[in-house]
Amino acid sequence: MASIEFVKVTKSFDKHEVIPALDLRIEDGTFTVLVGPSGCGKTTLLRMIAGIDPQTSGSVHIDGKDVTRIAPGQRGVAMVFQNYAIYPTMSVRENIEFGLKNNKVGKQERTELVESISATVGLSDYLDRKPSTLSGGQRQRVALARAMVKKPSVFLMDEPLSNLDAKLRAQMRLELIELHKKLGTTFVYVTHDQVEAMSMADTIVLMNRGLIQQEAPPEAIYRRPNNLFAAQFIGVPPMNIGDLGVDGVKFGFRPECAVLSVEPGGERHYSVRGTIATREMLGSETLYQVRAGDHSFMVKCTEDRFIVDQPVCLGVAAANLYFFGADQNRIGED
Ligand code: ATP
């Protein structure tokens, strides 16, 4: 296990500065997810930890040691990519064993390791199969097992689930959470998908344009977003934002925290009148778009009792309102 630390790190490609200045500590044994829009620098961060792409200035530390001059293979990290590199002509067993042969591990130890690790990722019954006969999820597990045999102190994963269909992705998310619990190793996971980040992370590092916007447990980012970017990136559909028309201050509320009614709601609700513009039945919930003056708000209800064009009152309890200043930061106590 190992902690990771970035100290005053910058990264430029030619003259293009991708990471202007970054200080970040990833605690030992955590499942940390780096999340943010495409191009914000997540993969660049991961590659700096791995040593594939060195930082332009500053230092990266693993387990308290400055690794700037340490080669990628010597850092005790393993990386699992979106396009997992598994060899099609080798069996599952040979794929998993491959890294060990290079490391001159003896035959018996190799066999034991391959068997215990394939059991951990649920591949025991597939050891003699060729990758082409496996499902996408099973292939992804081979890639994980290949990284695991090296017993890294840090796992780096770059969108490892993005080639899988939605159902399998959901299943693999749970499996990765389990795997992290079993191994207790530091996981650093990159994704642009906030659902993946919310469901797996114990710490989310939310990035935009090379800058950390917020670093916190999922629930804390959801409940207490630092700024407008965090408020709108985390949560589906995103937080509704409206203009108060004073000094650039904006207000916000989550779609699931608003109440729709025919008449104005309780005393502790702020409410506006509007009409239902669209209605989307999602199964257990219904998503309404409510038009109110110049604004359009999304509201998620557990009841499906309004129709398009129906006049409604949209109410939000004071405790569920957020306010953001002209600098885009959230106003108020934590
Ligand atoms: P995505 O979710 O799309 O993978 P990301 O957040 O992982 O995005 P990075 O791959 O870290 O983003 O890229 C950050 C920025 O650095 C982008 O603007 C990208 O164009 C640039 N970049 C990355 N690698 C190189 C490179 N080798 N040469 C030049 N620019 C690069």
Image (tube, grey):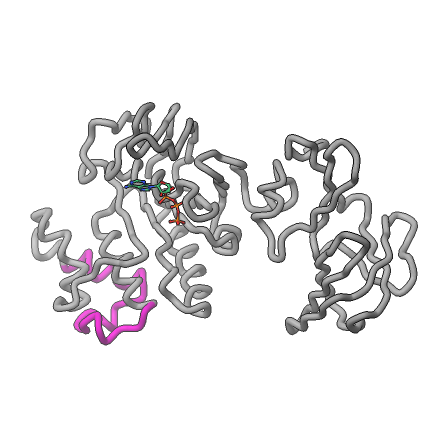
Q: Residue furthest bottom?
A: 133
Residue 330, how many percent across, how many down? 67, 35
Q: Based on the picture, tell me whether residue 130 belongs to the magenta stretch.
A: yes
Closer to the camera, 29 or 235?
235
**Residue 328 screen position, x and y as percent:** 64, 35
Q: Quadrant of the C terminus?
A: top right
**Residue 240: percent from the left, percent from the top?**
69, 51
- Residue at x 41% of width, y 35% of height: 26
Q: Main secondary structure of the magenta part?
A: helix
**Total numbered circles:** 0
Quadrant (top left/top right/bottom left/bottom right) for the N terminus:
top left
Q: Quadrant of ligand 1?
A: top left
Residue 34, quarter of picture: top left
Identify whether 214 is placed above or below 272: above
Taking the image as shown, residue 77 lies to the left or right of residue 232, namely: left
- Residue 19 or residue 49, whichever sits in front: 19
Residue 282, percent from left and from top: 64, 71
Q: For residue 171, which quarter of the picture?
A: bottom left
Q: Is residue 299 magenta?
A: no
Residue drawn at x 44%, y 46% as measured from the top left: 33
- Left or right relative to 265: residue 72: left
Indicate whether 101 appears above or below 168.
above
Residue extent of the magenta highlight? 111-136
Q: Residue at (56%, 48%) from the top-left corner?
A: 233
Left or right of 155, for residue 323: right
- Say which residue appears at 39% left-offset and 32% top-offset: 19
Is residue 82 placed above or below 218 in the rendered structure?
below
- Relative to 230, is 141 on the left or the right? left
